[in-house]
Amino acid sequence: MQAVIIDQYGSPDELHMTTLPQPEIADDEVLVAVAATSINPIDWKARQGLLKSQFDWDFPVVLGWDLAGTIVKVGAKIHDFKVGDDVFARPDIYADGRRGTYAEFAAVKEDKLAHKPAELSFEQAAAMPLAGLTAYQVIHDRLKVQAGEKVLIQAGAGGVGLNAIQIAKALGAEVTTTASADHHDLLKSIGADHIIDYHDTNITDVLHDYDAVFDTINAIDDGIAVLKPTGRLVTIDGAPTDAQKAQGPDVSSWWLLPNGRELAILGDMVVAGQLRVIIDQVFPFTTAGLRDAHRHSETSHSAGKLVIDVDPEKNAD
């Protein structure tokens, strides 16, 4: 199969196309012919070597942790999926570092899979798993947002923020977010009640008595400052100190747990019109396409997901 790999850590120029064997699947896995994948900040952070303390991979490494595609092989213990099913998933991060989704085929455990709704394109489905699950798990599972609560979501125009705003609104919350002025119309269109331009306004000057804060930019102190004494904060971009945890509010960090059941909920929300998939740009599955997508993700402040279109015709076994 064709795959885009890195042979060492470094710049986007380390990404290049090569030929690798198709992944062998275990009894609880399926093999998916990948139709689309997408870019997340974890991709380029991993490419730069910033995750070495968590994942000690041997090269070559195949990055990528979103996929949508069609099942072409199933393991002996697979019960709810079959060959020919269209699916989407955030696969596990495998210890060998060679099972990412920048490839024509990927192995996925059954409990990480969700059936792709027919109403979603492969590109839309591939844009959802990592960012959507992170948002859902923080807003619904960790912060336990309730109707009528005041919620601050930092960096609303990012992939996670766009999902978090819509999930919080679907739960009935009053949502405030931060973003540059050129994204305000988009954020209003997906339900944000209040938008603060972080270039000219400090949130601690204008916000107070919030029930919950979703921190995506490691601004924990600012988040704590706007909370009620009984409020709660979850960060996905920092590690709260003991001093921050001792200030009164419930302060914690979160790392995504891949979950096919919750991914299916997100798919249902899209079909029901509660969640809109926002794609900024689609890139080809080529060396140049992946390099361009990484550069765009690292340096651009555009809103929406960056999707890689893996031509389904190339995925024939």
Image (cartoon, rainbow, N blue to C red):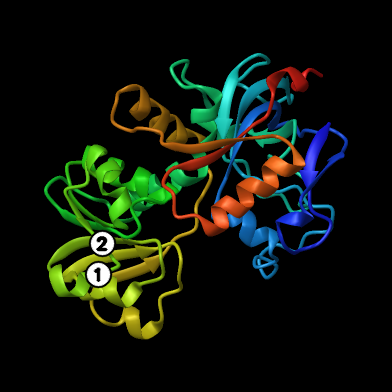
Q: Measure the C-alpha gap from mark 1 to mark 2.
A: 6 Å
Residue beneath the point at 44% across and 47% down: 159
Residue 273 location in percent, x, y?
A: 29, 25
Q: Is residue 113 above or below residue 235?
A: above
Q: Is residue 282 left or right of residue 204?
A: right
Query: Which mark is on residue 197?
Result: 2
In the orientation shown, which residue stands out farthest toward the front? 182
Relative image position of residue 218 (x, y in whole percent): 41, 70
Which residue does the image show at 16% across and 48% down from the upper left? 193
Q: Horizontal and vertical percent for residue 138?
A: 37, 53
Q: Is residue 23 left or right of residue 31?
A: right
Residues at circles 1 and 2 in contact by the CB criterion of under 8 Å: yes
On the image, which quarter does residue 274 sit in?
A: top left
Question: Which corner quadrant holds the C terminus?
Answer: top right
Left-right relation of 66 to 266: right
Label at residue 200:
1
Residue 149 seen in the current view: yes
In the rendered view, would you say 147 is above or below 69? below
Q: Residues within 10 Å of mark 2 (few under 14, many from 20)?
A: some
Q: Could you tell me residue 300's position as x and y percent? A: 50, 55
Is residue 128 something that shows in the picture? no
- Residue count near mark 1 (Cα–Cα under 10 Å), binned few <14, some 14–19, many ≥20: few
Quarter holding the N terminus? top right
What's the amino acid at mark 2? Answer: Asp
Helix, strand or loop at disc 1? loop
Q: Between residue 206 and residue 126, name the one nearer to us.
A: 206
What type is the residue that disc 1 sits on? Asp
